[in-house]
Image (cartoon, rainbow, N blue to C red):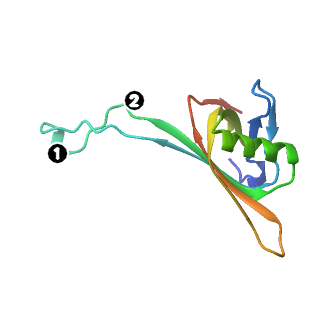
Amino acid sequence: MAAQKGRDLLLKIDSDGVGTFVTVAGLRSRSLAFNAQAVDITDMESAGEWRELLEGGGIKRAAISGAGLFRDAASDALMRTLFFDGAIRDFQVTIPDFGTVEGPFQITALEFSGRHDGELTFDMALESAGELTFAAV
């Protein structure tokens, strides 16, 4: 796979709760991370005293983070409302030449900052809140 433009990593939110996805505007940086918690099943009879893990066990999770500036009143208001309500909504992350990850996420952090001579910016963090799907390109 050739090098990709970071701006092509898109974060979209289900704006109406029924599958109408809109791009979260103003993001200058964004990331998607996957984790799978291991389940240790090592015991006294483990070969060579090496740790053993339970295949398919544990908890899978995904985290999204982003930072940017406010550009679109509609998506800004939606993100703010979802955070203060503690609501869970479907999000999509489009990874160029790879695919799309979609599923429920909750906004777990929303930070605002600004300098007296600059623009208002925000940082946000989202955590997966259910099963995610992946559709390859």
Task: Examine the rendering and report whether any part of residue 5 can be seen.
Answer: no
Q: Quadrant of residue 97?
A: top right
Instruction: Work out which residue is located at the far top of the displayed protein and give it.
Output: 18
**Residue 116 to residue 99: above or below:** below
* Dot label at residue 49: 1
Query: Which amino acid lies under the numbered mark 2 shown in the image of this protein?
Result: Gly
Q: Quadrant of residue 111?
A: bottom right
**Residue 69 to residue 61: above or below:** below
Which dot, 2 or 1, sits closer to the camera? 2
Q: Could you tell whether 107 is left or right of 23 in the image?
A: left
Q: Residue at x 79, y 33 (%)?
A: 15
Q: Residue at x 87, y 47 (%)?
A: 73
**Residue 110 to residue 38: above or below:** below
Provide residue 49's location: percent of width, then percent of height.
Answer: 17, 45
Query: Which amino acid lies under the numbered mark 1 shown in the image of this protein?
Result: Glu
Task: Examine the rendering and report whether any part of residue 129 can be seen.
Answer: yes
Q: Secondary structure at mark 1?
A: helix
Q: Residues within 10 Å of mark 1 (few under 14, many from 20)?
A: few
Quadrant location, the C terminus: top right
Provide residue 131's location: percent of width, then percent of height.
Answer: 56, 28
Q: CA distance from mark 2 to mark 1?
A: 21 Å
Residue that numbered label 2 is attached to:
56
Q: Residue at x 80, y 45 (%)?
A: 77
Foreground of the two, 90 or 97: 90
Q: Residues within 10 Å of mark 2 (few under 14, many from 20)?
A: few
